[in-house]
Structures are given as structure tokens and as C-alpha cells.
Amino acid sequence: MDVEEMVAIFLHIISHDVKNRIMRRQFARSGETVSRQFNVVLNAILCLHELLLKKPEPVLGDSTDSRWKWFKNCLGALDGTYIKVNVLASDRPRYRTRKNEIATNVLGVVSPDMQFIYVLSGWEGSAADSRVLRDAISRTNGFKVPQGYYYLCDAGYPNGEGFLTPYRGQRYHLNDWTLPPNTP
């Protein structure tokens, strides 16, 4: 099997949540071959993570980017998202989100130019964002925030060292700024 076909199988499986038996029919390969080649591509991507995932660079004090110039030493932003999944019926309560969907909670961290720095997937949809972040930080080779730097995040995360959340009770949405702000 050539590299292009291996990558095509891998991308098709992860983007469309397709089962092995479907892939073996579409690509006219055995289920064992599909599984083995999927793992070869996955391991190659994991080995290349140094090239694929960008190292964070802080926003400088003299930044000219109108969105980021206010955030000196900021390394980027982080947030969680839900990705719908299929799980066993016995596991569905753990994966049920507050919007009643069956999903996994994925933490994504990006640099100011929207390049991924860190991704943690696999948490149940019922898990709170702060719990997923706490797990990412506690892992041996997990998410690290260098001393003196920080990430922007929403109110679902702790406002502690390395993380800057909005002030409680303040509205920061763009449509709120059509009128001049009425608070400092």
C-alpha cells in the first residue's frame, strides 16, 4: 500500500467516524490491513508532533496586531469544544453534555496566529472545562505554562497563574461594543 492510500484511509476514518468494516469495503483491503496502516500513520504523526505543533511565542509589548497588542506576554488562547462520538449505551450518561448530546470534551490551545500548540482529547462530555485543564497540566508530558506568561481563556477556567479569564459580570461580546462601554 502506498503512502497516499494510507493517509487517505487515516484521514477518512478520523474525519468521518467510519468503522473498519466500511473502510475495508471502500478501499478493497482486509480489516487487519486497514487497522495496521491506520496505526502506522497515527504513530508517524505522533513522532512528528515537534514539527506539526507550534511552539508558543509571546505577544511582544510593541505588537502592532490590534487584537493582541493589549496582551503583553500572552502565549495564546485555550478553550474546550465538544465532538460528537458513538459510545456504548452503558457509557452514554458520562458522555452526555449539558445540551443532551453524546460527545467528548476536547481542550485546544492555540497561538495568537491560530496555530495549535496543544490538544487533549478523550474526556467525557460531562467533564467540566476546568477539570480537563487540570488533567492536562498534571500529566508528565502535559500542558505547561512558562513562568511570567499566560493564556487567555473563558470563564469556565480558573483565573490563576498562567491563565487570564474575563471579569465576572462583564460582557465582552463584540455586539456589546456598538455603544461606548459604560464601565471601566
Image (tube, helix red, strand yellow):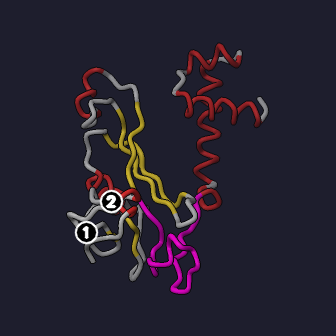
Magenta residues, start to end: 53-78
Which residue ends up furthest to the bottom in the rendered image?
62
119 left or right of 98 in image = right
Front residue of 40 and 113? 113
Which residue ends up furthest to the right in the rendered image?
2
On screen, residue 53 above or below 30: below
> In the rendered image, which residue does mark 1 sit on?
167
Disc 2 from disc 1: Cα separation? 10 Å
Q: Which amino acid does label 1 sit on?
A: Tyr
Q: Are marks 2 and 1 in contact (CB under 8 Å)?
A: no
Which quadrant: the N terminus? top right
Q: Which residue is drawn at 23% across and 29% down?
A: 93
Q: What residue type is labelled 2?
A: Asp
155 left or right of 66 in image = left
> In the rendered image, which residue does mark 2 sit on?
154
Q: In which quarter of the image is residue 92?
A: top left
Element carrying mark 2: loop
Spot occupied by residue 61 in the image (x, y as percentages of width and height): 51, 86
34 left or right of 178 in image = right
Spot occupied by residue 98 in the image (x, y as percentages of width and height): 24, 37
Which quadrant: the C terminus? bottom left
Front residue of 80 and 168? 168
On screen, residue 23 above or below 85: above
